[in-house]
Image (cartoon, rainbow, N blue to C red):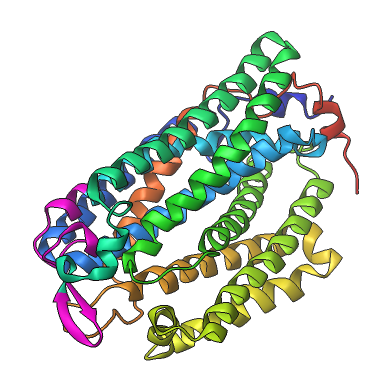
Amino acid sequence: MSNGKSADTAAPAHGGVSAEIWKFRALIVGVAGLAVTLIGLFAADPVRVGLGTLIALVFWLSIGLGMWFLIMLFHLFDAGWGTVIRRPMEHATTIFPWIGIVFFVLVVYSLFADTDQGLWKWMNPDNTVVIAGETATVDDDLLYHHKSPYLNNAFFILRSLLYFGIFIGVATVLRRASFSQDRDGNGGWTTVCRKWSAAGIILAALSVTFASLDWLMTLEFHWFSTIFGVWFFSASMRAALAATVLVCLLLVYLGVFQGVFKRSHLYELGRLSLAFTVFWAYIAFSQYFLIWNANIPEVTYWYVNREHELWWWVGLALLFGHFFVPFIYLLFYKNKVQPGRMIFICVWILAFHLLDLYFNILPTKQAESGLPYYNFGVNLWDVAAFVGIGGICFWAFMQSYLGQKAIPVRDPRILESLNHHE
């Protein structure tokens, strides 16, 4: 077939620069960005730099986690149409070990940071907290003592290792099974992937939920939300779908997916993006409505802090920019099938996903200036962390991509996917 050559290409070149060189450049940019971030951690406001690094880390991790969920859903429901787009997602899951390293650097820093300089306040009993309007220490906090069987340093580290172990372990099994099928054509690998996906989807749901609670919600350990993990899942799926569209269209532009990734695949991804746009809005509104309606001071303060300064405008931007604009835009058929229009809305979704992470993470800590929270803003250290972690993720993606077929050429569902129509 005319697209067979493109599909079999393992390491295409574009613009006279090989993919190997792009991989090397990504590694250099990633290391440089993380080096600048590390300098900022000791030379600038360490809490602000740490929060910016956590935001960047969660942004890139959420994309990988969303793609990981999609891979398992494709296997579990025998979704043939998604076979050709599954391979870029499999490459993307190679970012988990490297993001894990960056995360544990933040954990180690927080464990040994000076008083009130770590990210997770509960890690140090001498850190200050506000109790009934008065300043006290974590060690004096009765609520912390009730939560300490769960919120303690050893158990936190153990759980985090378990989460990354699940991410890396299940993703590696699925990826290697898919690559093995390319080599020997054994249809049994499809069964292996389906069985691992059946178990993996349960492990993924639990690990991603508890990871979001541990890493993000406990930044303010007084606050709690039973729906927070679902919010993070919905946000990750939106980001993953947007990133998948951009990667696939880039591969079309490079000639690798020419004739392979069709308008029908773009349409399906657009429909899923619309569905998860509605789902994210439902979850985000439900959390706000339930907390505000209950009117419990221990939890309503989370939203109160986000109704002052620039955060008020950020909240409005999320309401209109992260829901209404994508929702209305993706209702129209042409917007879901024209590459240029999908590139626009996918970049838009990723930008507002990043803004959503700022909204959820940045106001959780008291600023060095004495303000009760950090105001919204993007600084040099944020950019360095975002580019640094992004560079490492792109390098990991290319490391996997260069050694494999561009699509699962021997998957039993490959012809169904190639011939998929709306």
* Quadrant in which the N terminus is drawn: top right
**Is 52 on the left or on the right of 343, as rendered?**
left
Residue 265 or residue 69, whichever sits in front:
69
Q: Residue at x 68, y 23 (%)?
A: 8
**Is 322 on the left or on the right of 155, as rendered?**
right
Residue 304 or residue 155, whichever sits in front:
155
Magenta segment includes 131: yes
Q: Residue at x 73, y 34 (%)?
A: 76
Can you see residue 255?
A: no
**Is 57 on the left or on the right of 241, as rendered?**
left
Image coords of residue 318 (percent x, y): 55, 78
Magenta segment includes 130: yes
| Residue 363 placement: quadrant | bottom left
Image coords of residue 317 (percent x, y): 54, 82
Above or below for 55 versus 34: below
Q: Residue at x 25, y 85 (%)?
A: 132
Above or below for 213 versus 67: below
Above or below for 315 versus 27: below
Can you see residue 174?
A: yes
Q: How many marks?
A: 0
Image coords of residue 310 (percent x, y): 40, 87
Question: What residue range appears in magenta?
Answer: 108-136
Q: Residue at x 55, y 41 (%)?
A: 204
| Residue 135 placement: quadrant | bottom left
**Is 63 on the left or on the right of 101, as rendered?**
right
| Residue 224 placement: quadrant | bottom left
